[in-house]
Image (cartoon, helix red, strand yellow):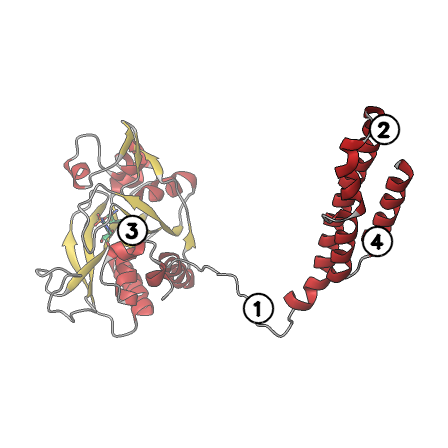
Amino acid sequence: MIERIDALRAEGERALSGATTAADLEAARVRFLGRKSELTQILRGLKDLDPDARARAGASANETRVLLETLLAEAEARVRAGSAPEIARDVTLPGRRPPVGHRHLIQSVILEIQQIFHGLGFSVAEGPDVEDDRHSFGALNMPVGHPARAETDTFYLRPDVLLRPHTSSVQIRVMEATQPPVRIICPGRAYRNEAVDATHFYEFHQIEGLYVDEDVSMADLKGTLERFFKELFGPKTEIRFAPSFYPFVEPGAVVDVRCFFCSGKGCSVCGPLSGGWLEVLGAGMVHPNVFRAVGYDPRRWTGFAFGGGIERIAMLRYGVPDIRLFYESDVRFLRQF
Ligand code: FA5
């Protein structure tokens, strides 16, 4: 019987490894492993043998069955792989395009702004989002206890460590690290504990500008910003300067852009009481105390600075009626830009 089992094993191995089609395989399976196959009959008849012969024949027959089952599985996989390409590789089918993301609108607007200021001779500076008291307030002429600190409801991480409430901190970092003349812009995030509405969010982007040289005047500031807004929004853009107070500039101003949504009637974007103007920027001539704080001689150096909200600029540029849309990550909104 052992010889017969050996012979079946050799025949089965040959048949299975030589099979090239599903039909060959099925025939080999039925012949060597099927319910009526000789091997199955031998296995069934083991119980009638005497114990000694049963042990030897049983071991050999079971080994053969396991081997042939393994070969069958391998042969099935081989035949499947061999026949699959005809079905799967239809070169005439159009390819499946993987989804591709793109720049967020805020980043595109930042790049656009950078390009305009690059043309005006400004380079880009960066500073940390997590700041200390000196760079956010102290060196900006807001010593401890100054009432202007309360105007921005700041997120504190520790008493001296905070999320910067404006990008003006980068002015200080740049002036500490370089000597005049300075001509930089700094785009970046700012954080304030704000009541959220159509134009206010607790996390937003600002673009800071700083120009320090001899004989810089308010006329340079106005000319630069007018040029910037006309480049960004088109030559018909209307802007206005209104006096305002920021401790780090003197004189200070807010810059408003005529609201594109309501053309001056007042709406949810510019506010019903705004008269149709949307505040986008704070600006002014750098305060002598700021120069002193960074070791610049205020008798020699003069400069202007400005800080604007990028979301508000993007809202006007692209007709976005609510700042919250930028942060909801809804691709139906984002993929429009
Ligand atoms: C400042 O942050 C000053 N650092 C700007 C400045 C720089 C003035 C240099 C003078 C010289 P203000 O708090 O007004 O100023 O904010 C500036 C701009 O940031 C606003 O005009 C507005 O466009 C934007 N902004 C302020 N708060 C928010 C907010 N919660 N959500 C969206 N944009 C905001």
Position of 1 compared to 202: left or right?
Answer: right
- Number of labelled discs? 4
Quadrant housing the C terminus: bottom left
- Identified by mark 4, the residue type is Ala
* Above/below status of 26 relative to 127: below
Residue furthest top as drawn: 52
Tag 2 residue = 53
Q: Is residue 13 left or right of residue 291?
A: right
Residue occupied by mark 4? 15
- Asked which quadrant contains residue 49, the reply is top right
Query: Disc 4 to disc 1, how far (Cα)?
Result: 40 Å
Residue occupied by mark 3: 305
Circle 3 crowding by C-alpha within 10 Å: few under 14, some 14–19, many from 20: many
The residue lying at 15 percent from left, 51 percent from top is 244
Comes first in the chain, label 1 or label 3: 1
Q: How far across and down, in percent of the image, does residue 5 sit?
A: 86, 40
